[in-house]
Image (cartoon, helix red, strand yellow):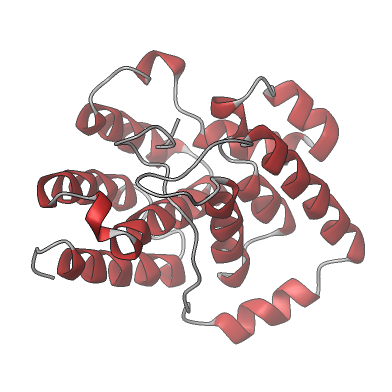
Amino acid sequence: MHGGRAGDDRRGAGRGDLPGRHEARHRARAHPVSDLAVFARAADLAARAHVGQRRKGGDVPYVGHVLEVAMLVAEAGGSAEEVTAAVLHDVVEDSDITLDALAEGYGPEVARLVEGCTDDPAWADLPRPERKSRQAAHLPGEPEGVKRIKLADQTSNVRDISRLPEAWPPSDAAEYLEGAERVVAACRGASPALEAAFDAAVAEAMQKSGGTP
């Protein structure tokens, strides 16, 4: 998982601006209506896969996080496949849904992107810093689309520290931010817009958690 457990990376949803939003919206409008239908099916699957899961420290349904990740990828100009994979990026870790099933239902490219966002099951019980180090180590060889989804994922996660600072003791927030910075460092160059959104989220989280930007 990327954090749905208490004390891990599963944190709520929110909305924020990205550089180049108008350009990205123009590109999103160019996607065929069929792409919207595919995304709607994927969002429904994600809602069912994450049913009952909540974000750290609150009562926000976990599906809000994956919807925010998809929104961030779309606004940064991601492809239809990347946006679909973004809303599905945690379903393999959090449910019995398989990569083969995703390939059959949404195509091999979506399945490949989700695979790149999915942790090795052997990492599940590792301490968070070690798990983040392993995520960062495997990302340089992943497709740019995987990196864009991970940038959006980490941005959404870091925003949760600002949205619910009382759930994040300063030491926990600092440890999470350090790990997120490591993951994002492995993805830089894939999307300046998403990198800027992440950097802004970190600065705000540090202020809210008692650190310094």
Residue in the picture at 33% in, 52% down:
184
Quadrant location of residue 123?
Answer: top left
Residue 212 or residue 187, whichever sits in front: 212
Left-right relation of 37 to 138: right
Image height of 124 relative to 81, above or below: above
Q: Residue furthest right?
A: 34
Image height of 113 relative to 24, above or below: above
Image height of 21 relative to 166, above or below: below
Left-right relation of 112 to 124: right
Q: Residue furthest front?
A: 59
Across and down, in percent, residue 205 comes to 24, 64
Image height of 84 relative to 165, above or below: above
Residue in the picture at 62% in, 83% down:
23
Of the 4 image quadrants, the one containing the C terminus is bottom left
Residue in the picture at 23% in, 25% down:
127
Across and down, in percent, residue 141 comes to 44, 37
Residue in the picture at 71% in, 51% down:
81
Residue 205 or residue 27, whichever sits in front: 205
How many labels sit on residues?
Answer: 0
Left-right relation of 140 to 54: left
Q: Residue furthest bottom?
A: 22
Left-right relation of 1 to 52: left
Across and down, in percent, residue 14 comes to 49, 66
Quadrant location of residue 45?
Answer: top right
Of the 4 image quadrants, the one containing the N terminus is top left
